[in-house]
Image (spheres, rainbow, N blue to C red):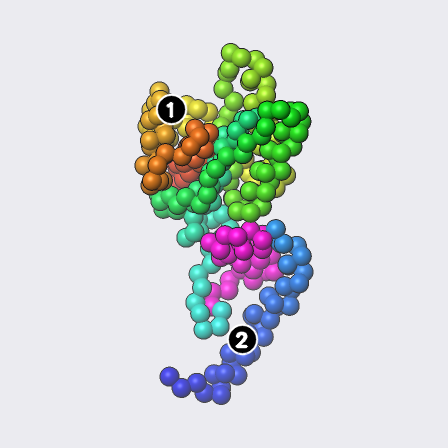
Amino acid sequence: MTVSPLMIYLWGIYAILVIGPFFSQLPVLYKRYYPLFYAVSRHPLRAVKLVNHIIQTINLPNIKRIGFFFVEISLVGGGSVLGLLIMGVDPGIAITGYGLVNYSDNRYTIIDYGCIRTASGIPVPERLNQLYQELVRIVVKYGPEHYAVEELFFNKNTRTALVVAQARGVAILAAACSGVPVYEYTPLQIKQAVAGSGRAGKSQVQFMVKTILALPETPAPDDVADALAVAICHAHIHSWERKFK
């Protein structure tokens, strides 16, 4: 295909009128969205949503063609082809499990998972601060759109329950301060969503987490598997709620 001077001229006008305003605001946008740019540099799959968010910010929501490329841009949080990035957390003072799962069209993609450990020999306030700082770091790194936490269940040991409640409060605060919406689920809801029964044992839930996420082995320690189970639970419930709205 030959490219005529007229075609080049028309593309030049198009670039000035449509793409020009976008690039002219890049310095301001970079300053404003530095954490998001950092998250995208760490996890490129979020790039499309970031670009879409910036385009909406500068009032260019209907751009469908950029240069010679055709780019489909979905609404932020409106069912992107990239799915929904969920961070599940199982809070604890000694070990806090976390898992990041991307959910799209009933398919799960594991992004990262692990645990945060705090030493037992240091004061509780310092342990809670370590937990908070590490959770914020993970949220900034990956930029999850939803944050799911297990609700506190009754514990006969009052002292243990209080410490776990403190860790849970810190986990929720880390998401709230990062601007990520928090969703809470009971152990019964999580078991039903993952294993199909509210009476499922821990081993059954762990086996289903491994199967659903197609993992080579069961995540360890148990707190990590529990965190991934919370993320899966939220994916199920959130998708059903959207269908019936």
The image quadrant of residue 175 is top right
Residue highlighted by disc 1? 202
Q: Are marks 2 and 1 in contact (CB under 8 Å)?
A: no
The image quadrant of residue 101 is top left
Residues rendered magenta in the picture: 36-65
Q: Residues within 10 Å of mark 2 (few under 14, many from 20)?
A: some
Task: Give the residue at the far top of this rendering.
Answer: 156
Give coordinates of residue 156: x percent, y percent. 51, 11
What's the magenta bit mostly, secondary-structure-wise?
helix
Residue highlighted by disc 2? 14
Identify residue type, mark 1.
Answer: Lys
Frontmost of labels 2 and 1 is 1
Residue 245 in view here: no
Is 86 part of what is drawn in magenta?
A: no
Give coordinates of residue 204: x percent, y percent. 33, 26
Q: Residue at x 32, y 36 (%)?
A: 211
Which badge, 2 or 1, is on the more N-terminal residue? 2
**CA gap, disc 2 and disc 1:** 59 Å
- 171 lies above or below 160: below
Task: Give the residue at the far bottom of this rendering.
Answer: 5
Give coordinates of residue 3: x percent, y percent. 43, 85
Q: Residue at x 61, y 60 (%)?
A: 58
Local secondary structure at mark 2:
helix
